[in-house]
Image (cartoon, coloured by chain):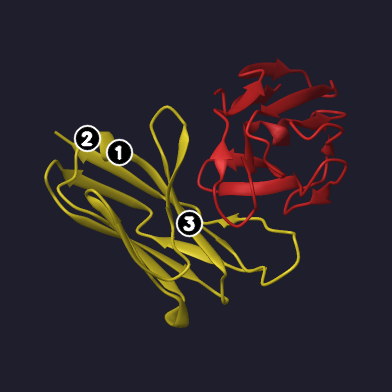
Chain colours: A yellow, B red
Amino acid sequence: GIQVEQSPPDLILQEGANSTLRCNFSDSVNNLQWFHQNPWGQLINLFYIPSGTKQNGRLSATTVATERYSLLYISSSQTTDSGVYFCAVDTNSGGSNYKLTFGKGTLLTVNP
Amino acid sequence: NAGVTQTPKFRVLKTGQSMTLLCAQDMNHEYMYWYRQDPGMGLRLIHYSVGEGTTAKGEVPDGYNVSRLKKQNFLLGLESAAPSQTSVYFCASSPSGARGYTFGSGTRLTVV
């Protein structure tokens, strides 16, 4: 099956700093999503981004499908950005068996 | 709207006991998924369903069974619990599979 690798595994920032999280995948994908898991365990969908660039406030994401990677940018980080960021992909090009394969995540800690 | 509701939120089982985890969604989603999350492993797919009455195996299905008798409910069963099944279990649903994942708040299961 497809391999999803995220880097770095851990990241510690001071409030106000910027960061870039990376997701590499081993095969062509039709679906790529970024999720944030807050310190209480809740998983929130951040971006659906199989290709191109999207922005939502201080967060933006870029996927270069031809080179099999995606980047999540966090600008002016806040303590509420702390948590685990997951990249998840699906390679299904047809049919109905859509399912996401997750990377192991990046643990982000933003200190005040 | 409640979204995706998982019950129970916490449970401690003895080795060999059985139990059922319930996932209920009120968004009329076709797709439902069960994942387990272990430290450093990300989320791994156990079983999933692409519609009422259907189920399929994911990445780590051994020791688990599922049923989707009603569109809104997806049950995960452990017939004979083992310590290796100690984990946090997440249910998710989506309208089309490709995007729009909504996660429940998780069930923390400990098998002693």
Label 3 SS: strand
Is the residue A5 above or below the residue B55 in the image? below
Mark 1 surroundings: few (<14), some (14-19) or many (≥20) residues within 10 A: many
Same subunit, tags 2 and 3: yes
* Residue toward you, B93 or B81: B93
Q: Nearer the viewer, residue A81 or A92?
A: A92
Q: Are marks 1 and 3 on the same chain?
A: yes
Q: Nearer the viewer, residue A16 or A29?
A: A29
- Where, by quadrant of the figure, is residue A77 drawn? top left
Task: Confirm or deny contact between disc 2 and disc 1 (CB under 8 A).
Answer: yes
Q: Quadrant of the N terminus of chain A?
A: bottom right
Residue at 72%, 31% in the rendered image: B83
Image location of residue A20, percent across then percent down: 27, 60
Q: Where's the C terminus of chain A, which quadrant?
A: top left
Mark 2 — residue? A79
The label on residue A33 is 3
Q: Which mark is residue A82?
A: 1
Secondary structure category for the residue under label 2: helix
Residue at the location (58% across, 76% down)? A27
